[in-house]
Image (spheres, rainbow, N blue to C red):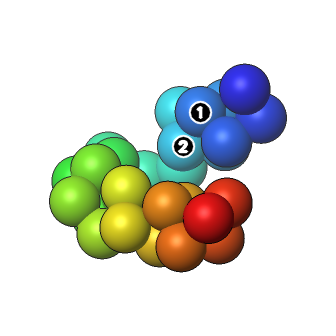
Amino acid sequence: MRIFQQHRHGPPWRLAVDGAVGKRTWAAVWA
């Protein structure tokens, strides 16, 4: 949940980056 909170506080463009690249990044981290 902390991840989503940080995104909300972050800039709008960061949401787009986390939406596309973030999925693969977190998938690799948690995998």
Query: Is residue 9 in view?
Result: no
Find residue 23 and report its horizontal and vertical position in percent: 37, 56
Q: In the image, is 24 to the left or to the right of 10?
A: left
- Report helix, strand or loop for mark 2: helix
Quadrant in which the N terminus is drawn: top right
- Report helix, strand or loop for mark 1: helix
Q: Which residue is mark 2?
A: 7
Quadrant in which the C terminus is drawn: bottom right
Residue farthest along the front direction in this orientation: 31
Mark 2 touching mark 1, by CB under 8 A? yes
Q: Is 18 rendered above or below residue 9? A: below
Q: Nearer the viewer, residue 13 or 3?
A: 3
Q: Residue drawn at (77%, 35%), measured in percent from left and top?
A: 2
Amino acid type, label 1: Phe
Find residue 4 and report its horizontal and vertical position in percent: 59, 33
Amino acid type, label 2: His
Q: Nearer the viewer, residue 25 or 6?
A: 25
Q: Residue drawn at (37%, 67%), measured in percent from left and top?
A: 24
Mark 1 Cα-neighbour bin, 10 Å: few <14, some 14–19, many ≥20:
few
Find residue 17 and report its horizontal and vertical position in percent: 28, 64
Q: Residue drawn at (22%, 59%), measured in percent from left and top?
A: 20
Q: Which residue is mark 1?
A: 4
Query: Is residue 18 in view?
Result: yes
Find residue 27 and report its horizontal and vertical position in percent: 49, 61
